[in-house]
Each structure stands twice: as structure tokens, then as C-alpha cells.
Amino acid sequence: MNEQLDEQARGLSILVWSCDLSRPELLATPFMTAQAAAALDMRVKMLFSSQSVQWLLAQNAGLPTGFGDQRWPIGRHLEASNELGVEIRACTQALHASGAGCAALSAHCAGVEGMVSFVEQGSAPGWRMLVF
């Protein structure tokens, strides 16, 4: 197989579902993982599902995530990840269940995506999937 095609196909899908607003320390690891993979020239997609979708709402941009003096507001994580080319999306069902719509999402969120589409891409050749 052509090495150039292999490089283009390398990707990481990250499903974030367990990091609700009450456990902000859990959110640092998925973001650091996404940013590291993007810095290594991998395509990266993050899908926020379940209660984690709350982190993508613009109204929560100032909430801190991470540990100790290394805490960043979620808005800074979203912006930094977006600048590195990380595609960030909200799970369609989770956003609907939260009572919010697409207009409530952060400007750094690329919109919504269904689970079938996300899993399909994450299982494509050259892609890996992580779940947080």
C-alpha cells in the first residue's frame, strides 16, 4: 500500500461520554490526547455524547477543566483543539436530550453527528478509536 495514502488515512476518533460538568478533571485527558494526535499530523475527531455534550454549549465556555494550576477554561481547550485541526462534534441524540439546539453550541464545535457515522469513520482502515 502507498505510504502517502497510509499517512493521509491515519486518524483518531475520540468518544467523550463520561465527563459531565460535575467532573471537570476528567475532560483534560481527552483534549490533551486529541491535541497530541493532531500535533503528530493525525486527523482527529471528537464526539461528545451523553452528559458530556454540555461542555460544548457556548454558555459553559468559562468553566475550568483539568487539574490544579493547569486548569483551562473549556473554551480555551476547544479553541486550541480547533486550531490544531481537531473536528469537534456533538452527538445528535445527546444534544437533543439536553434540550439545547445547534445554535447553543460553541463556535469551535463543527456541529452534530450521529453515532453510526462516527463509528463508521472510527473503524475505517488507518483509524483508531478511544473512549473517555
Image (cartoon, rainbow, N blue to C red):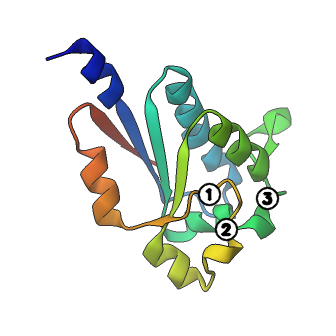
Q: Are marks 3 and 2 in contact (CB under 8 Å)?
A: no
Secondary element under disc 2, as helix, strand or loop, is loop
**Percent from the top left, x then y, of residue 33?**
53, 33
93 or 18, nearer to the observer: 93
How many marks on residues? 3
Which residue occupies the extreme top position in the image?
Answer: 3
Q: Quadrant of residue 21?
A: bottom right
Residue positioned 57% across, 37% down in the render? 85
**Percent from the top left, x then y, of residue 4?**
29, 16
- Residue 3, compared with residue 59, is above or below; it is above
**Percent from the top left, x then y, of residue 70?**
80, 33
45 or 33, nearer to the observer: 45
Q: Quadrant of residue 105?
A: bottom right
The residue identified by callout 1 is 109
Front position among marks 1 and 3: 1
Q: Residues within 10 Å of mark 3 (few under 14, many from 20)?
A: some
Front position among marks 3 and 2: 2
On residue 105, which mark appears?
A: 2
Q: Residues within 10 Å of mark 1 (few under 14, many from 20)?
A: many
Q: CA distance from mark 2 to mark 1?
A: 6 Å
20 or 1, nearer to the observer: 1
Question: Tag 2 or tag 3, which sits nearer the N-term?
Answer: 3
Secondary element under disc 1, as helix, strand or loop, is loop
Secondary element under disc 3, as helix, strand or loop, is loop
Q: Amino acid at mark 2?
A: Leu
The residue identified by callout 3 is 61
Q: Residues within 10 Å of mark 2 (few under 14, many from 20)?
A: many
Q: Amino acid at mark 3?
A: Ala
Q: Are marks 1 and 3 in contact (CB under 8 Å)?
A: no
